[in-house]
Amino acid sequence: MKRLILTRLKNNIVCGLFDGNVPVEMNIESGDKPSLLGNIYIGKVKDIKKNINAAFIDIGLEKNCYYSLEDNSFPYYAHGLEKEVPSVGDDIIVQISKEAVKTKPPTLSSHLKFSGRYVLVETGKNEFGISHKINIERKEELYNLLFEKRPDNISVIVRTNAQNAADEDILAELCEYKDIIENEVPKWKMRTAFTCVKKNEPYYIKLLKETPLEDFDEIITDDTDILCEAENFLLEYCPLEKDKLKFYSDKSYSLSKVYSIEKCLSDALYKKVWLKSGAYIVIEPTEALCVIDVNSGKKITGKDKESSSLAVNKEAAYEIMRQLRLRNISGIIIADFIDMKNDENRLELFSYIKAIAEDDKIGVKVHGLTHLGLVEITRKKVRMSLYEQYKNAYNECN
């Protein structure tokens, strides 16, 4: 049974997705410093760095934010200004597309994204895509329904939730975002610098909006404010799923204790992860990449070491992909598996890693297995890692 657990720990909201009693995803939203990802601001250009083809823009945070001039070809200038390349002093409408990561400031974009339950709309592009999880017949229906109705210079990506949704609901959502782009964005251009013109919803609402609710058997919370917001969302968007929302009211034994939330967080921050076989993996995040080492422990013994190595490697591969999702580790990941001499075994392991990587809703690419047992994996970097979320929420140092 898959459960989404929503609770508060020390004024921070913890979202935990559990498959049975096993945590699959953990996220922490700081009560004092909520995530800024997706917020839209009027920013002021403070510096242009021609050597890296980038600008640094002040949106009212402690640090100026990074803005790629190469990736942003359609800036939304404030106060009627129109030109291709921004200059120091210009006011631009920008959205936080990536949170601050370690020493790097947040990344800004002029391609404004509006993420709905059925469609994701992005300005400044002209693309159309449909989730690969939607069946072929429905894809054709959605293409005929939406392709000609999308606004000019707007990208539309159809989410998995559209598989069983009513056509009128999908069209209504697309029209809602079209109205924002055509009627609200021009009004934002008249606002002053450092103003937040659109604030993103709490992470748990974003999670409910973007995830097919068939993935959850239950949504459980012990917080009345979270209950109210989640209930309002479900009544508006998914009334048939509202019975999945449960309120946990036992005061003698808290919800966080029932699901060992604090232990799950602690385990997810520890670098060593034991496997059932007795082998283990070591996860070492660095500034540039994350290195993961597979250790056999005392598991590989006897004559058929090759078969034992393959079995341990496959067990480790499954756990590595679970840990990447659980800890939200992104960027470049190098996994050092146990050496295998047999080419067929290496190919089997590589195919297995690619197959389980497809279950991750965040873009993951697996880039080959070397004779030394090294696998390079890249995972899209957007939200902070769980470790950084924890530091942010609990004000901890390294």
Image: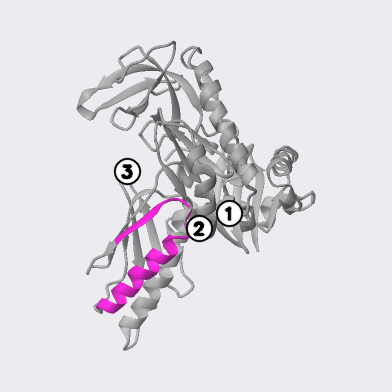
**In the rendered structure, which segment of residues is drawn in magenta?**
343-367
Q: Nearer the viewer, residue 208 or 372?
A: 208
Return the x and y of residue 383 as percentages of the image width and height.
46, 41
Q: Nearer the viewer, residue 296 or 241?
A: 241
Give the answer, above or below, for where 37 lies relative to 259: above
> Callout 3 environment at 10 Å: few (<14), some (14 to 19), or many (20+)?
few
**In this picture, residue 288 sits left or right of residue 244:** left
Point out the frontmost of discs 3 and 2: 2
Magenta segment: does it hold 353? yes
Residue found 45% across the figure and 41% down from its top = 384
Determine the CA span between mark 2 and mark 1.
8 Å
Is residue 93 left or right of 89 when viewed as pictured? right
Secondary structure of the residue carrying tag 3 is loop
Residue position for label 1: 163
Amino acid bearing label 1? Gln
Mark 1 lies on a secondary structure that is helix
Looking at the picture, how far across and down is residue 18, in whole percent? 60, 58
Q: Nearer the viewer, mark 3 or mark 1?
A: 1
Tell me: residue 20, above or below residue 201.
below
Say whether marks 3 and 1 touch (CB < 8 Å). no
- The answer to whether the residue labelled 2 contacts the one labelled 1, judged by CB atoms less than 8 Å apart, is yes
Circle 1 packing at 10 Å, graded few (<14), some (14-19), many (20+), is: many
Q: What percent of the width, then of the height, locates residue 115?
A: 53, 38
Which sits earlier in the primary sequence, circle 3 or circle 1? 1
Res. 13 in view: no
Q: Which mark is residue 133?
A: 2
